Image (tube, rainbow, N blue to C red):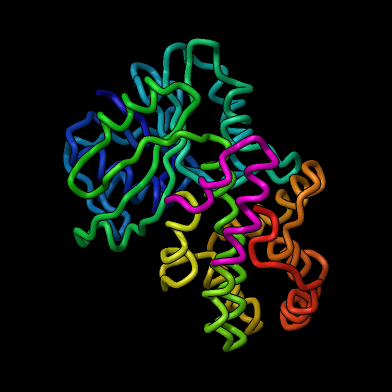
Amino acid sequence: MRITVIGCGRWGSFICWYLDRVGHDVTLYGRGASDRFRQISETRSNGTVTFSNKVKFSFDLQESLAGAQIVIIAVNSQGLRPLMNQMAHYELSGKTVVLCMKGLEIGTGKRLTQVADEFLPPDAHSAIWVGPGHVQEFIKGIPNCMVIDSKNTDITRFLIREFSGGLIRFYYGQDLIGNEIGAASKNVVGIAAGMLDGLNLSSLKGSLMSRGTREISRLIKAMGGNALSAYGLCHLGDYEATLFSPYSHNRLFGEKLVKGESYDELAEGYYTSKAMMLLADEYDTELPICSAVYDVLYNNVAPGKAISTLFLRTQKGELYDI
């Protein structure tokens, strides 16, 4: 199977390394102007994974897409639309585009498959690959479980058959809306967890997990998805990797924010929190934790005050809305 991976960051590089290991003909694409990608192509390593001699490197997008049956995209979520606009100039007929990032379009609140589908021809397909796992643990041989989902059940099964290996156990996604919203929003909850760590309130993370899952399940249901998806691998199942792990960008971003320290890595939850506010309004759904994170990030509300506001909300039954 010929597969092209677009995105030479930590996750995209790992996916390239992993798919090569399970037996595919993989090309890793990076922009010609990227010094980072040039270094990777010259050394066959990004410092974390080392690529076999079978992996091809390409600076030419058209060449990378030609002949690839599957195109994996692992770029920042806000870069998806311009990338898809560029890809649309080339032949995409019959291809399956798999989105391996977790986010929402900040200006519209659209799910990433909705963005991708705007540019794909009718006979092409989009899918998502989400769930828990860190590159640093995978390369040590520590396995995990993940989810692949799409609107087409045959495509979902095809991808799982092609991608399965001893390192990752894949489950069939059965709710594209729920899996996309759950995967994107867990990064917002991850920022909240980091804020708790920075305030020395880590013991509250159990409550954060419980209440965070409840509010996301309400949104998923309001959007027409299955509320139970929030309790699956896309969201609750990814909490350990996002709310507790030292490798979590979102958790670390929240912690450093509270401590007044800078953080230069991508934290997708920053953008997702704003998009979540669009969805909260559109679907008339209360998202108190996401709103609190948004207020801290965009309205300069002090983290301690945001937490106090959550505790002062009207009391109600724990599962009042079930």
User: From the image, which quarter does the N terminus lie in?
Assistant: top left
Residue at (81, 46) in percent of width and height:
284
Q: Going 25% across and 29% down the picture, which residue do you hit?
A: 161
Residue 240 position (above or below residue 268):
below
Is 58 rendered above or below residue 67? Answer: below
Residue 40 image point, x, y percent = 33, 49
Q: Position of residue 294 (x, y in %)?
A: 74, 63
Q: Is residue 219 magenta?
A: yes
Residue placed furthest toward the bottom: 200
The percent coordinates of residue 190 (x first, y second) are 55, 65
Q: Main secondary structure of the magenta part?
A: helix
Examine the image and state in which quarter residue 48 appears.
bottom left
183 relative to 304, above or below: above
Q: Nearer the viewer, residue 64 or 168?
A: 168
Q: Which residues are magenta?
A: 210-233
Q: Quadrant of residue 47?
A: bottom left
x 64%, y 42%: residue: 221
Counting labels gives: 0
Rendered position, 69 above or below 285: above
Residue at the (49%, 45%) spot, across then down: 101
Q: Is residue 13 magenta?
A: no
